[in-house]
Image (spheres, rainbow, N blue to C red):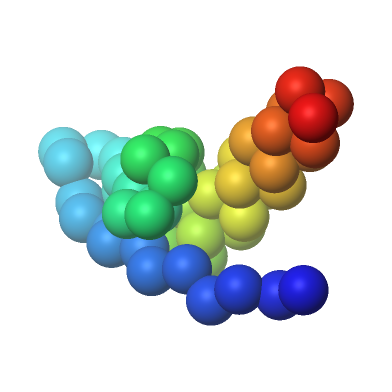
Amino acid sequence: MNKRLNAVIIKEEKWYVAHCLELDVVSQGKTIEEAEKNLKEAVELYKEDLEKLK
């Protein structure tokens, strides 16, 4: 099942910080696109860890 998640991306000095609101997962990148890509990877890792705990 795919679930839509919301993210907020803000610029903090030289980095863009991406935050998944529902999971409280955060990542960053030098561009908006990189921050988004890195956040998607971080969310996937988070979800994999949750599956291992079941």
Q: Name the residue furthest left.
A: 13
Position in image of residue 32 (x %, y %):
41, 62
Instruction: Decide if residue 5 is on the left or right side of residue 14.
Output: right
* Foreground pick, 23 / 19: 23
* Foreground pick, 28 / 8: 8
One can see residue 8 in this view: yes
Q: Name the residue furthest top.
A: 53
- Give residue 3's quadrant in the image: bottom right
Instruction: Decide if residue 25 is on the left or right side of residue 11.
Output: right
26 is higher (above) or lower (below) than 31? above
Position in image of residue 29 (x %, y %):
46, 44
Position in image of residue 54 (x %, y %):
79, 30
One can see residue 31 in this view: no
Position in image of residue 52 (x %, y %):
83, 26
Which residue is located at x 51 percent, y 60 percent?
A: 36
Instruction: Decide if residue 24 is on the left or right side of residue 44.
Output: left
* Foreground pick, 38 / 25: 25
11 is higher (above) or lower (below) than 36? above
Which residue is located at x 76 percent, y 23 percent?
A: 53
47 is higher (above) or lower (below) than 34? above
Which residue is located at x 62 percent, y 55 percent?
A: 40
Quadrant of the rendering where the N terminus is positioned: bottom right
Instruction: Decide if residue 12 is on the left or right side of residue 21.
Output: left
- Give residue 8's quadrant in the image: bottom left
* Foreground pick, 10 / 24: 24
Q: How many marks?
A: 0
